[in-house]
Amino acid sequence: MRERLADGLYGLGWTAVKRLPEPAANALGRRAADVAWRRRGDGVRRLEANLARVVPDAGEERLRELSRAGMRSYLRYWIESFRLPVWSPERIRASYAGEDMRHLTEGLARGRGVILALPHMGNWDLAGAWLVTALNTPFVTVAERLRPESLYDRFVAYREGLGMEVLPHTGGSFGTLARRLRAGGLVALIADRDLSASGVEVSFFGETARMPAGPAMLAQQTGALLLPAALWFDDTPVMRGRVHPPVPVPETGTRAERTAAMTQALADTFAAEITAHPQDWHMLQRLWTADTAPVRTAPEGRRPS
């Protein structure tokens, strides 16, 4: 029943929110964020616990301010995503301003493939639509399988409608990603939370966490560039972002050691960007290995990767 309800609510968002006038849709998002924040469900409490690692000197009041801003940022992501299918190409191109994009464009010009690795920040779907629309650069990504299957199908259809190629997180996607990279293509991956049992241990804000090994392994296997990137909002309708220089492949060590070093480099870059924009890190789930107590994920805590 809960799965069917979630599917119905997301379906309602895609059909109803995109028909609202933009000021009304934005106001709805802020109200929904504030209601969720005041209720202090599992997702909000987890967000505050995660932010306490990011801003260790913050007192309770500061953490509450950050979590409220974080929920508003998170709902901005959803409202924009619900409305993206009806945005014009001109609107999409004008809605993102990136820094150091040369790392991406020059990397693609090499013809040996590029991997963009991002944390759960800003609006990943808008960035993807911008890549397709403004740079005329199709790309492939993976998506976590959601329940029910109809909800997963909604997300796949939505992202494919924006011009992305979407592969399931399970089911042999690594080989397809490698082939796309060897052909000079672009792969974009959310890379700050491990969804498998083969993640790499990293030091993240001074504690141990696990992050996916896939980006580093793909870079080593294919020769593609591995570029960390981050997204954030400010007080304007335009989302901001930054692409960082390539993560180098170590010249020595075993493959596992090289993978660990490259993944740690990603974690360090993510940490710096999250520190600069903590309210735009939408991590409403457990991340650090110390957080072993089971936590029931509330509906507001689910954001597809």
Image (spheres, helix red, strand yellow):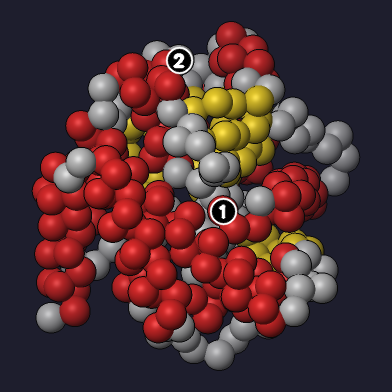
Image spot of residue 114 (x, y percent): 57, 26
Front-lying residue, 187 or 285? 285
Left or right of 237 in this view: 51: right
- Closer to the camera: disc 2 or disc 1? 1
Q: Quadrant of the N terminus?
A: bottom left
Q: Secondary structure at mark 2?
A: loop
Asked if residue 157 is positioned above or below residue 30 in the image, the reply reads: above
Please give the name of the residue rendered at 66% of the width and 16% of the height, measured from the top-left corner: 102
Please give the name of the residue rendered at 45% of the width and 42% of the height, measured from the top-left corner: 124
Image spot of residue 21 (x, y percent): 20, 41
Image spot of residue 37 (x, y percent): 45, 75
Front-lying residue, 247 or 233? 233
Mark 1: which amino acid? Asp
Asked if residue 47 is positioned above or below residue 242 in the image, the reply reads: below
Furthest residue toward bottom: 293
Mark 2: which amino acid? Leu
User: Do we see residue 56 in this rendering?
Assistant: yes
Image spot of residue 284 (x, y percent): 50, 69
Q: Where is mark 1, residue-wise?
A: 280
Alpha carbon separation for disc pair 2 and 1:
24 Å
- Counting the numbered discs, the total is 2
Which callout, 2 or 1, points at the residue further toward the start of the chain?
2
Q: Where is mark 2, residue-wise?
A: 135
Please give the name of the residue rendered at 63% of the width and 37% of the height, measured from the top-left corner: 229
Front-lying residue, 189 or 172? 189
